[in-house]
Amino acid sequence: MLQLSIPRVRNLKAFRATISAVRSSHFSTAAEPSSSSTPPRVPNLIGGAFVNSQSSASIDVINPATQQVVSQVPLTTNEEFKAAVSSAKKAFQTWRNTPVTTRQRVMFKLQELIRRDIDKLALNITTEQGKTLKDAHGDVFRGLEVVEHACGTATLQMGEYVSNVSNGIDTYSIREPLGVCAGICPFNFPAMIPLWMFPIAVACGNTFILKPSEKDPGASVLLAELAMEAGLPDGVLNIVHGTNDIVNAICDDDDIRAVSFVGSNTAGMHIYSRASAKGKRVQSNMGAKNHGIVMPDASPDATLNALVAAGFGAAGQRCMALSTVVFVGGSKSWENKLVEYGKSLKVSSGTEPDADLGPVISKQAKERICNLIQSGIESGAKLLLDGRDIVVPGYEHGNFIGPTILSNVTADMECYKEEIFGPVLLCLEADSLEEAISIVNRNRLLPLFP
């Protein structure tokens, strides 16, 4: 058993006052400045205690609408990571033998607490990630649906029994937990994706190591607090922070039996190959280039509403965003209305009640998106709507990109080949439905999405 002395957060109530979205000026609104010169450090969760990392290295968590430093996330040390795994391994011995109905009751209580604190969670997400409050509520709600599903795991864990399968032979199967599992999360859904992972895992009797995105870890901390309030025993859920080093540690650790990942193709393929090489079960959900096909007789209003919502919602930062439209018979008759619908969307801080889309996550993300737009223009695409130079009053330093539409896009352009992950809609043309389907099926990103 690994022994490690880690300083606990001395005043957990005070820490909660800084990490909670509604109880701290750091997390309250996008417009308010920090009341302290030193932002709070996000703690690890190890063995049921929120503990300050001993690491001297940290990453600023930045409000993408204001560039305000919301908090600092430490790069968890290897010693702290080992302590988290050891805690999860120890807790597994008891948790695996906890009656399934007891684990089920924890999930029932967790969904109740998430509903109670949904506004806090949503405001924290908007502050750290930038999406609108409406989108942030949807982020939490979609995760809540998974918790509700976890409430029914008792029947899902039933085994099978067949008597007299052969002379004097009966057969049966049982479902058993694996042990310590881990989840590596992206920035774009700070509540939904952690809730995809740990509730199902722990409801089935596993223990869990959660690594939130270093860009917006606050929601994971809040959810962990709720899980503990719901009755989850110490060590069943642990949180560590970091970037490449901690990801590799998760992939390599012999005590971690399974890894779940959501994120980019490059990271996903690395995690899949590295973790599976160590004998782990791995699920790796990666990027996508989602296409829509529009027929000449499609309903104009319904089609335009669907394209704008799917293409520009959440600032295009979701793997299910519709980034590409193939117009059968040509796009000319659609372009003016599509631009009109795009211009009607309000770009602002996610805390503004009438905002339709907020900023993208970082200045680096904005630069990458703008570069892909420019590469399309230089390759011959026509810029129908340009959102690159948008300025939002009161949030002039935000990472904002308005709805952007490119037409005359071809399959050999870089902007088509890459997942843009921003509010950019590409318009292609096809002469027939068969040609449109062929264009979609040839895109190299499609096979990577499960």
Image (cartoon, rainbow, N blue to C red):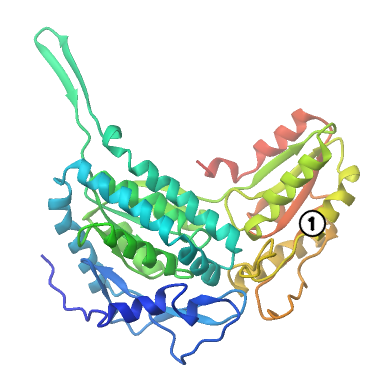
Q: Secondary structure at mark 1?
A: helix
* Residue 219 sits in quarter: bottom left
Residue 334 spot, x, y in % from top left:
86, 45
Relative side of 36 to 316, left or right: left
* Residue 227 sits in quarter: bottom left
Give above or below for 64 relative to 402: below
Closer-to-camera residue (293/270): 293
Closer-to-camera residue (335/167): 335
* Residue 72 sits in quarter: bottom left
Circle 1 residue: 342
Residue 194 spot, x, y in % from top left:
41, 56
Q: Name the residue at 55% across, 40% down.
A: 447
Amino acid type of disc 1? Gly
Q: Name the residue at 27% across, 51% down.
A: 106
Give above or below for 418 relative to 295: below
Q: Is residue 112 visible?
A: yes
Residue 443 spot, x, y in % from top left:
65, 43
Q: Name the residue at 21% across, 61% down.
A: 235
Q: Name the residue at 84% across, 59% down.
A: 383
Relative side of 303 to 262, left or right: right
Residue 171 spot, x, y in % from top left:
16, 19
Mark 1, Cα crowd under 10 Å, few <14 / some 14-19 / many 20+, is many
Q: Is residue 276 visible?
A: no
Relative side of 155 to 335, left or right: left
